[in-house]
Amino acid sequence: MNSANESNSGQDVEQILFDGLNEHGFLFQEKCAEVLQHNANRTKWVVHTTEYPVSIKDRDSRVDIILRNTSSDSHQIYAIVECKRVNIDRGYWLFGNPLGTYSQPLLVNLHARYSKSGNYSINYAQLKAHFDDVATYLIDNWWLEIGRKGNKRYSSPNPIEDAFIQACIGVSGIVQELEVQCKKDPQELSGLFIPVVITTAPLYVANYEMEDVDLASGSINRDKVYFGPLGQEAEQMEWLLVDYGASKSISPTRLDEHVQGISPVELEEFHKRSIFVVNSKHIVEFFSKLHLVETS
């Protein structure tokens, strides 16, 4: 009797452990790093490190994966990767009406420059990402995670927003740490940091015309919005580019030195971060095409 109870108890424990293991994203993060490292020769992005601790303005966090690009001679280019596992059966990421489709979208990201003379700056670099003619949507308005929990539908912007915040904290924390280290040991460095969110969630965009949105109810009729090419079924996106507005609490302190202007229109550009959102099934293809060339 005791032996049977102990056996059942052991099986229960194993099931509890197994269920807990799959409830979180640690395995997903490890798998992303393994796949990216295995394909480093193809993509020209190598896994620099994982679980890297960062701090920014009393906020502690960890960067899931840091990738370094090996194809650039003029810059040290890093991808700061946040991995976000979503239950595929109940989670979709929907993004607002895109501004348009760009084969070479403009990136606005943190660019750190340091010199042996002790001069250093944290500024913005505007670079074009060449995608070998593979276009991507540019989003700058809204995003929602949508799905079902049991028989109930839910939607919330928070899971996606949290991923963007984590990516920005990762970039800012690394840039600020580099500043401290270069003060101790002045050296030449020109580094660009690209935030990337990798997710298991299927990615969709909502296409609609503002004239079809009812002002009284704030809603739109079903036949006035589509989630793929007009007249066709919903189409999943491989990746998207989001212009995200990062608050000062997740930006490097020194960045304020470059802020000029007094109106929101003038100040907006200093808050923008270009964040790539990539479906996990397409990460090798994405990084194979992400090779940055600075424009004058």
Image: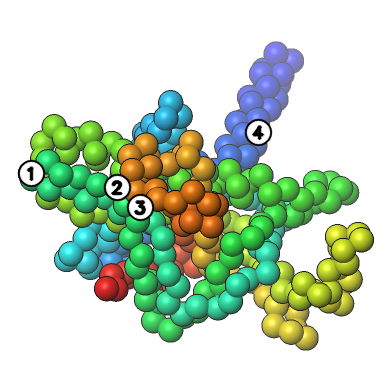
On screen, residue 19 above or below 65: above
How far apart marks 3 and 2 lie (CA) works out to 7 Å
Between discs 2 and 1, the one toward the N terminus: 1
Residue kind at label 1, given as amino acid type = Ser
Badge 1 is on which residue? 117
Mark 3–mark 1 CB contact (< 8 Å):
no
* Res 15 label: 4
User: Counting other residues with Cα less than 10 Å from the Cα at mark 3, is it few (<14), some (14-19), or many (20 or more)?
Assistant: many
Q: Nearer the viewer, mark 4 or mark 3?
A: 3
Badge 3 is on which residue? 110
Residue drawn at 39 percent across, 48 percent down:
259
Badge 2 is on which residue? 122
Residue drawn at 59 percent across, 62 percent down:
140
How far apart marks 2 and 1 lie (CA) works out to 16 Å
Between discs 3 and 2, the one toward the N terminus: 3
Q: Nearer the viewer, mark 2 or mark 4?
A: 2
Between discs 4 and 1, the one toward the N terminus: 4
| Pick the front one: 17 or 280 | 280
Residue drawn at 68 percent across, 27 percent down:
12
| Pick the front one: 148 or 193 | 193
As helix, strand or loop, the secondary structure at mark 4 comes to helix
Q: How is the image coloured?
A: rainbow
As helix, strand or loop, the secondary structure at mark 3 comes to strand
Residue kind at label 2, given as amino acid type = Ile
Residue 249 on image: x %, y %: 48, 36
